[in-house]
Image (cartoon, rainbow, N blue to C red):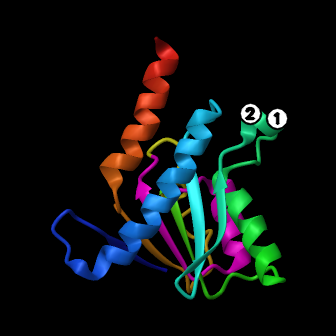
């Protein structure tokens, strides 16, 4: 597993990652509009979005209905198989251990997440959950991704 971290000064090599993370942010906003924790995900294969997902845990009354799980299921259906070996997941917040486990079983090629999750993220609790060939990148649109979640919970406390 290789990990790369982005900074605001990285070159144009991240343009594609920024584009797809913006698409994940659109999904996150859909979740927020439904009063769900605003986390969104897209799965890309050969430069094309093949699946989208956002949190639906409250809507479906299902603790497993995380954005990543919704996107994994949609991508597997689109591809007609359970392995996502040629795919990249873009998700606004670092996956939890449950989602990382599912991503590991899917053998996804790459995961790009926006902001870290210090309380529940897999990197803290189970960094070896993923398939050994999976590449990880983080920090793409970090401030936008974290602001969405922070604002959501701030408004819940008002």
Q: Position of residue 104 (x, y in %)?
A: 67, 73
For the residue pair 81 and 15, the one nearer the viewer reads as 15
Q: Secondary structure at mark 1?
A: loop
Task: Specify the quadrant of the image occupied by residue 30.
Answer: top right
**Badges 1 and 2: C-beta atoms under 8 Å apart?**
yes
Instruction: Find disc 2 in the rendering and name its residue.
Output: 58
Q: Answer whether residue 113 is visible to the viewer in this image.
A: no
Q: CA distance from mark 1 to mark 2?
A: 5 Å
Q: How many marks?
A: 2
The residue positioned farthest toward the left in the image shown: 9
Residue 61, label in figure: 1
- Position of residue 94 relative to residue 55, above or below, is below
Q: Secondary structure at mark 2?
A: helix
Does 123 sit left or right of 19 as displayed?
right
Looking at the image, residue 63 sits to the left or right of residue 36; the answer is right
Q: Residues within 10 Å of mark 1 (few under 14, many from 20)?
A: few
* Residue 119, above or below 15: above
Position of residue 19 measured from the top left corner of the image (x, y, whole percent) = 40, 68
Residue span colored magenta: 94-117
């Amino acid at each position: 597993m290789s990990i790369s971290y982005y900074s605001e000064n990285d070159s144009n090599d991240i343009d594609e990652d920024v584009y797809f993370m913006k698409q994940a942010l659109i999904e996150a906003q859909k979740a927020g509009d439904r009063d769900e924790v605003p986390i969104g995900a897209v799965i890309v294969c050969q430069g094309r979005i093949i699946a989208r997902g956002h949190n639906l845990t409250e809507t479906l009354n299902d603790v497993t209905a995380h954005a990543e799980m919704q996107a994994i299921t949609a991508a597997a259906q689109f591809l007609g198989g359970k392995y996502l070996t040629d795919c990249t997941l873009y998700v606004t917040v670092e996956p939890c251990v449950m989602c990382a486990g599912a991503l590991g079983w899917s053998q996804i090629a790459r995961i790009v997440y926006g902001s870290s999750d210090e309380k529940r993220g897999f990197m803290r609790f189970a960094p070896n959950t993923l398939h050994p060939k999976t590449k990880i990148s983080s920090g793409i649109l970090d401030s936008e991704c974290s602001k969405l979640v922070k604002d959501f919970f701030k408004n819940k406390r008002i």
